[in-house]
Image (spheres, helix red, strand yellow):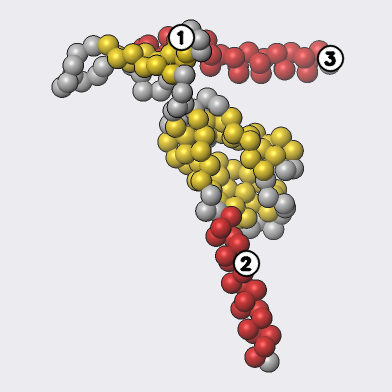
Amino acid sequence: MRRPLIAAALALLALAAQVSTAGAATISAVIDQGVRITLPAGARDVMVGNPAIADINVVDSRTAVIQGRSYGATNLMIIDARGRTIQNSQIVVSAPSGNRVSLYRGPGAGAAVANVANYACAPRCERTPMPGEVDSEYNRYSMPFSAYAQRAAEARRAVAQNGQ
């Protein structure tokens, strides 16, 4: 009688260790870039805690891509068919590390807000708005980019309506 209890306790400990290590990994993502991840076997539902920070697109039953949306940290939860959490990982979205230049204009120390302009450089620099810039500047440059998704959705609806 005692041996089955010990075996069951050891099995539960092994399962608990497996679940805690599955959720221990931190996923690093760069803003406006994707990170490919492998989904664990048995994954049914995939959720991101705050989709304003990171979003996820499931490619197939074993692959997903996390998209960094805004600076910050959130979590990724993967649920199996029984409703159990099989993975709970932290996602940290940060700035790109290379080929970037930030130009600060405006008053020096003690000023309320400095005007920041960000550029992507390889080999020449192009203006790339990033969160943290003065809102009017950020909106002026980011609006054409954010309209891409809306135009793509409209095109999909038009194709669906025409039966093509």
Residue at image mark 2: 15
Which residue is the extreme one toward the bottom?
Answer: 1
Image quarter for residue 5? bottom right
Q: Where is residue 121 in the image (x, y as percent from the top left)?
A: 47, 13
Packing grade of label 2 (10 A; few <14, some 14-19, many >=20) is: few
Q: Which mark is residue 164?
A: 3
State the quadrant of the N terminus. Answer: bottom right
Which residue is the extreme one toward the left?
Answer: 110
Left or right: residue 3 versus residue 125 is right
Which tag, 3 or 1, sits closer to the chain's start? 1
Residue at image mark 1: 125
Residue at 57%, 65% (x, y): give it: 17
Image quarter for residue 57? top right
> Of the residues tagged 2 and 3, which is closer to the observer?
2
Which tag, 2 or 1, sits closer to the chain's start? 2
Packing grade of label 1 (10 A; few <14, some 14-19, many >=20) is: few
Q: Where is residue 46 in the image (x, y as percent from the top left)?
A: 63, 44
Q: What residue type is labelled 3?
A: Gln
Q: Position of residue 30 (x, y in %)?
A: 50, 30
Residue situated in front as seen by the camera: 106 or 54:
106
Q: What residue type is labelled 1?
A: Cys
Q: Which amino acid does label 2 sit on?
A: Leu
Residue at 71%, 35% (x, y): give it: 59
Q: In this view, does 77 lie above or below 120?
A: below
Q: How far apart are marks 2 and 1 (CA)?
A: 51 Å
Which tag, 2 or 3, sits closer to the chain's start? 2
